[in-house]
Image: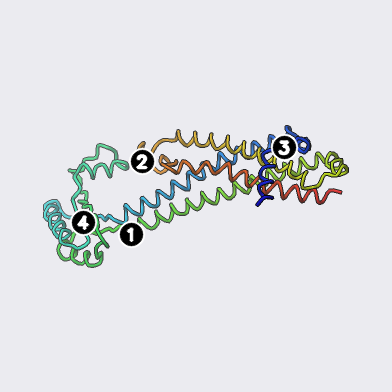
Amino acid sequence: MKLDLDRLRGLFAGDAGADRVVPPTGFTASLTLFAAGAMAFLAVFALALSLATARLADRWGDALARSSTLRISAPEGQMLAQTEAALRVLGTTPGIASARALTDEEQRALLEPWFGPDLPVETLPIPQLIEIIEEGDGYDAAGLRLRLAAEVPGAVLDDHTRWRAPLVRAASRLRLLGWVSLILIGGTVAAMITLAANAALSANAQVIGVLRLVGARDGYIAQAFVRRFTLRSLTGAAVGMVLGCVAVAFLPRTEVGGGFLTGLGFQGWHWLWPLTIPILSGVVAFLATRKAAQRTLRDMP
C-alpha cells in the first residue's frame, strides 16, 4: 500500500530532473493531447447513444407491452354497432383496465405523417381503432380473439407482439454498438499514446543512456514518461469531454419532434457519467505508457 501511494504521489508531483527526459513540447505532446481530446469528445456521444437507446428500449418495451389495438372494419351502417359490441366484450374481459374508441381527430393525427393534415377521415372508409390498456398479468389474447370472432366479425386484435420485439431488439443492438464504440475508442487512445511514448523514448535515447551511466534506474526514467503522458491524456480528455457535453447539451430535446435522434443526450444523474471519461483516459494512458516504456527501455542497449 505504501509503495502504491508513493507511486501515485510521484505521478502527480513529478521530479524536475526526470521530467527533463521527456520533451514538454513537440509532436508527441500535441499527438497525445489531440488523440485524448478527440477520443473523449467521441466517447461522450458514444456514451450518450448507449444511455439513450437504453431509455428507448425501456420506453418501447413498457409502452407496447401494456397496450393493444383493436381494428374494426365494417360497412358504414354497421360500424357503430360493431364498435359498441367490441367495447362491451372488452369491458368484460379480465386483464383489461380500459378500452376506448379513438376519435376522428386522434385517427387523423395518426395518419397525418403519411397523408398530411387535411385528410377527410370522416368521408373515407377508415377502420375504427380501439385502444386497449392492460392491467395485472394482462388478458388471454387467444380467448379474446375467439370471443371477438363470434360477436364482432369485423374486429382484428393487434397485441403489438410483432412490433415490440423487433423495436426492443434494435434498441438493444444500438446500445451494444455504443458500448463497443467506447471499447474501440479506449483501444485507439492506448495505441496512439503507445506510439507517442515510443517515439519520445527513441528520440531521447542518448539522454536516457547518459542517465543510466550516472546510475538512474529504468523505473525512475519510465516514471517520468508515465507521468507526462498520463497528465497530457487527462488534460486532453478533460477538454474533449467538456466540449462533447456542450455539444450534447445543444442537441434538440425530445419534445421537439419526438424522434429518436432528438432524444440523444443525458438525463438527470446520467450527466455524471461523462466525468469518468478523463479518469478512464488517464488510466489507459498510465498503463499504455508504462508498458511501452518498460519494453523500450528493456530493449535499449
Alpha carbon distance from label 3 to label 2 = 45 Å
According to the picture, the residue beneath numbered tag 4 turns out to be 97
Mark earlier in primary sequence (2, 4): 4
Please determine whether, in this image, residue 167 is positioned above or below residue 105. Answer: below
**Distance from label 3 to label 4 (Cα)?**
65 Å
For label 3, the crowd category at 10 Å Cα-Cα, with few meaning under 14, some 14 to 19 and many 20 or more, is many
In this view, the mark in front (3 or 1): 3
Q: Mark 2 sits on what residue?
A: 258
Relative image position of residue 24 (x, y in whole percent): 73, 33
Q: Residue at x 60, y 47 (%)?
A: 186
Q: Which residue is mark 1?
A: 161
Q: Where residue 28 is drawn, which disc sits there?
A: 3
In the rendered view, does 169 fall on the left or right side of 280?
Answer: left
Q: Earlier in the sequence, mark 3 or mark 2?
A: 3
Q: Which secondary structure lies at badge 3?
A: helix
N-terminal-most mark, 3 or 1: 3
Q: Nearer the viewer, mark 1 or mark 4?
A: 4
Indicate the secondary structure of the residue bearing disc 2.
loop
